């Protein structure tokens, strides 16, 4: 990437404001509630329950739809296409080094927190791998949805839209804290809120340093993939 291109990309700031961000987050919550309402309504009408696999597929389809509020209240309203949401080129060397260091840092912090969580007796993140099915086929589906679809959707919403919008209006510090707080609360499990909050901050720093979502997506996808693979191996190698 040439210096001119680097300057051009660094000047590409989110044109949406705090009000747009609030509306987008409310719309995202509304989509989740709509999905839950449809599921409860189907059960109430006697249409039957989805299978575990069907529920997990529906959940990830709903998560992919979280991109919609970011698109409507971002590029569709202000222009700029996907690039304004962070899906743009990046300086490879610097971004790869930043992403690698961030990934290692997150894993160390998560390991330290896991020891503390167990001492406190707090519940951890439940394992979703069994919902995808047995064997390598289930692992493959988990990697596709949990380490493919989910990180892309979440990074677009939380970093490309939420963090970027707050960064342009409130400054770096408040944007880091607020976007990480919303990101952690969205995961709903109290026992993992601290490490997910920290992960949200680190991913936002990666976005800030690379000026692109692709390194963030790479880190997020790797974390999810390692978690699924670790559970898969633990089930088959219990010792």
Image: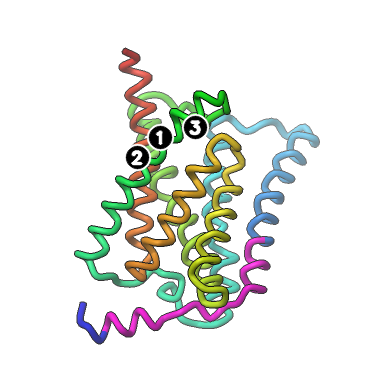
How much space separates mark 2 and mark 3, taking CA atoms?
Answer: 22 Å
Secondary-structure class at tag 2 = helix
In front here: 70 or 215? 215
Residue at image point 37% right, 48% down: 221
How crowded pointer 3 is (Cα within 10 Å; few <14, some 14-19, many 20+) is rated as few
| Element on which disc 1 rests | helix
Residue 51 inside the magenta-drawn segment: no
What span is colored magenta in the figure? 5-25
Name the residue tied to disc 1: 112
Label 1 vs label 3: CA separation? 22 Å
> Mark 1 touching mark 3, by CB under 8 A?
no
Q: Residues within 10 Å of mark 2 (few under 14, many from 20)?
A: few
Which residue is identified by label 3? 128
User: Residue tagged by mark 2?
Assistant: 108
Q: Residues within 10 Å of mark 1 (few under 14, many from 20)?
A: few
Q: From the viewer's perspective, is residue 182 above or below residue 211? A: above
Badge 3 element: loop
Residue 1, position as x, y percentages in the image = 21, 77
Real-space CA distance between mark 2 and mark 1, rounded to the nearest whole angstrom:
6 Å
Relative placement, left or right, of 15 versus 136 is right
Q: Nearer the viewer, mark 2 or mark 3?
A: 2
Between marks 1 and 3 in the image, the one whose residue lies nearer the viewer: 1
Judge whether 58 appears above or below 166 on screen: above
Which residue appears at 36% of the width and 79% of the height?
Answer: 10
Q: Earlier in the sequence, mark 1 or mark 3?
A: 1
User: Which scheme is used to colour this image of the protein?
Assistant: rainbow
N-terminal of the two: label 2 or label 3? 2
């Amino acid at each position: 990437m040439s210096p001119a291109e680097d300057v051009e990309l660094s000047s590409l700031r989110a044109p949406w404001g705090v009000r747009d961000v609030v509306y987008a987050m409310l719309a995202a919550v509304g989509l989740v509630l709509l999905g839950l309402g449809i599921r409860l309504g189907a059960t109430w009408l006697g249409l039957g329950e989805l299978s575990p696999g069907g529920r997990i597929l529906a959940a990830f389809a709903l998560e992919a739809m979280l991109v919609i509020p970011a698109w409507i209240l971002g590029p569709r309203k202000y222009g700029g296409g996907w690039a304004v949401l962070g899906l743009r080129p990046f300086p490879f060397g610097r971004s790869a080094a930043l992403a690698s260091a961030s990934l290692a840092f997150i894993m160390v912090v998560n390991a330290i927190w896991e020891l503390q969580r167990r001492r406190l007796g707090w519940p951890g993140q439940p394992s979703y791998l069994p919902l995808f099915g047995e064997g390598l086929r289930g692992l493959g589906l988990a990697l596709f949805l949990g380490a493919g679809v989910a990180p892309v959707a979440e990074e677009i919403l939380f970093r490309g839209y939420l963090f970027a919008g707050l960064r342009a209006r409130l400054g770096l510090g408040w944007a880091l804290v607020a976007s990480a707080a919303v990101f952690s609360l969205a995961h709903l499990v109290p026992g993992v809120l601290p490490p997910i909050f920290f992960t949200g901050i680190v991913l936002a720093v990666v976005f800030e340093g690379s000026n692109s979502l692709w390194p963030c997506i790479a880190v997020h996808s790797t974390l999810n993939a390692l978690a699924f693979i670790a559970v898969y191996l633990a089930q088959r190698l219990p010792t």
